[in-house]
Image (cartoon, rainbow, N blue to C red):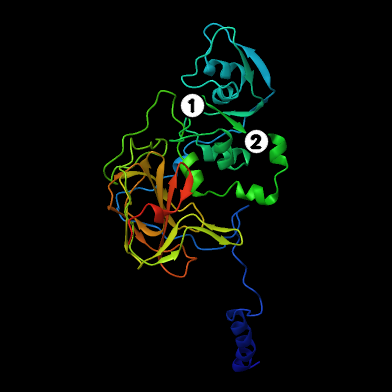
Amino acid sequence: MRPYARLALILPLFLAACIPNMDRPAKAPRPGKGRPLPTAPAPRLEVVAPDIPESIPSWRAQAVEPDAVEIASSVYTVKAGDSLRSISNKTGAASEAIARVNNIPPPFVIHTGQKLKIPGGRYHLVRAGQSGIAIARAYGVDWSQVATMNQLEEPYILRTGQRLLLPSKAEVSSMTVEQRAAAFRIDIDDLITGGEPALASNEKTVKPVETPKRVLAPSVAVGEPPRFAGQFVWPLNGKILTSFGSKGNGIVSNGLDIAADRGAPIRAAADGIVAYVGTEVAGLGGLVLIRHGDGWITAYGHADAIGVSRGQAVKQGQVIARAGDDGTSDTPRLHFEMRQKRLPVDPMKYLPRS
């Protein structure tokens, strides 16, 4: 066979090997085992102060083992040397629940020979560093429900050795799919009432830091300021896009949406302590929560950039963040809420006329 004839036979084979098969679909990348594919991009969040390191949220500081004990109702006769806490340790019921059912007011004085009703239920013993949110997730229940069941009050910081009443196993097993999913969603109320790690019974909350360069460890609890300064100012000037209250069809706005230019400064509405910085509340993007004392809390959502850190003391009018959006709204804005003892209130009633 002549050389050019042999080349004519080999050349098509060589070209076929070099040209990819366009009819064969490319393999899709495999997601991680048991990990769903993301449905939306994560909110953008920039920390303005470069010295603020990333850390895990405070509510994740300590893992929780779901080892709650379910006890029956009973009657206990007080013995010499007993206290409500020692009776709690003996019976497995929460000392606070024992005080409530027996109408024992602070300072919780009991007497030898006194017969106390012991409320039955399912109780979890709080360990050092455990947060309310982490405890609720360990049992697959909604933390806000647990906080209400236990009648928790400001500053909502659990104590090591405290017992929490939980929904029973029967209640949990009867939950709908929607209720189970809702139990794993975090909202502002959850962060307010269950975001701090538990402290020892005699341990105090940390003194506020004055600069974002010093960041609190997630195992340290942020307390309530001693008192509220007495007035609020607007965190940002702009058109009100969404007002407070019911919008029909089951939709409720817990605050105001205020139009803003992207990057516009967001200011603290009053003196306080930063209780939370993060992106864990769906639909709010970058979020800052500030405690002001006397049960007052303000929330600032849709921030693209945040310049304060958890535990930091802030002054009224101080720039704490920059306005943006969470990737779902059509324009940059600030979502602003005011809460008093967990209850959302209309900011228009407490802000200066503008």
Quadrant showing the N terminus:
bottom right
The label on residue 11 is none
Q: Nearer the viewer, mark 2 or mark 1?
A: 2
Residue 34 % position (x, y): 63, 52
Give the class, few, some or many, for how many residues have Cα within 10 Å of label 2's Cα (few <14, many ≥20): some
Give the class, few, some or many, for how many residues have Cα within 10 Å of label 1's Cα (few <14, many ≥20): some
What residue do we see at 54% from left, 37% from top?
147
226 lies above or below 102: below
Residue 334 % position (x, y): 40, 61
Q: Nearer the viewer, residue 272 or 108?
A: 108
Residue 55 % position (x, y): 41, 45
- The residue identified by callout 2 is 167
What residue do we see at 70% from left, 35% from top?
169
Q: Amino acid at mark 1?
A: Thr
Secondary structure of residue under mark 1: loop
What residue do we see at 61% from left, 28% from top?
123
Please indicate, yes or no, whether residue 26 appears anywhere in the rendered image. Answer: yes
Tell me which label, 2 or 1, sits earlier in the chain: 1
Q: Amino acid at mark 2?
A: Pro
**Residue 194 as seen in the image, left or right of residue 308:** right
Q: Nearer the viewer, residue 239 or 87?
A: 239
Quadrant showing the C terminus:
bottom left
The label on residue 160 is 1
320 lies above or below 21: above
122 lies above or below 299: above
Q: Nearer the viewer, residue 188 or 98?
A: 98
How far is the residue under mark 2 from the one under mark 1?
20 Å
Residue 251, image quadrant:
bottom right
